[in-house]
Image (spheres, rainbow, N blue to C red):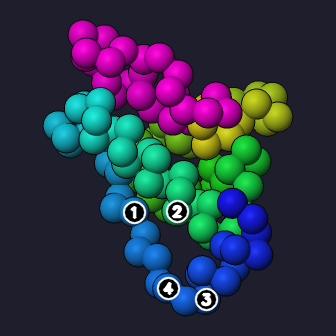
Amino acid sequence: MKEETIKKATRLVKIKEPEVFDGKGEKWKDTINFNEYMEQLVRWLKWQGLAVDKEEVVERASFQFTIMAARWLKDYSKKPNSAKRNIHGFMVLLRKKIIPSTASVHHGSSFRGA
């Protein structure tokens, strides 16, 4: 999506923040709920005018994570080689920690950029 299109659209509409992700609720263990939330989060970050492949986006997204998810994000942010840290990489890590290995859709990287 073009940057000028995003700027024009954000002037016209108030975009609600995604709900807070705690990493503990049963609903997050469902692959469909997890994937839909992460897609919504990335879309919301893009509408904020942020480049989702940058490490700074992880910092902005951190306000949407609490409890265990916030702890895992803190650990992820301390990871060496910051060139590899982005929101998609964190989503893959989060998915591995939350979605059971027996889930119908396993840990495959369905997130672009990871």
Label 1 amino acid? Answer: Pro
Task: Give whichever of 80, 53 is nearer the camera.
Answer: 53
Q: CA distance from mark 2 to mark 3?
A: 14 Å
Q: CA distance from mark 4 to mark 3?
A: 6 Å
Q: Earlier in the sequence, mark 3 or mark 1?
A: 3
Label 4 amino acid? Answer: Val
> In the displayed image of the protein, which residue is found farthest to the top?
102
Q: Look at mark 2 in the image and give the residue it sits on.
A: 44
Residue visible at 64% across and 28% down? 114
Q: CA distance from mark 1 to mark 4?
A: 15 Å
Label 2 amino acid? Answer: Trp
Q: Earlier in the sequence, mark 2 or mark 3?
A: 3
Q: Earlier in the sequence, mark 4 or mark 2?
A: 4
> Percent position (x, y) of residue 10?
59, 81
User: Mark 3: which secondary structure?
Assistant: helix
> Percent position (x, y) of residue 16?
41, 74
Task: Give whichever of 84, 79 is nearer the camera.
Answer: 84
Q: Look at mark 1 in the image and give the residue it sits on.
A: 18
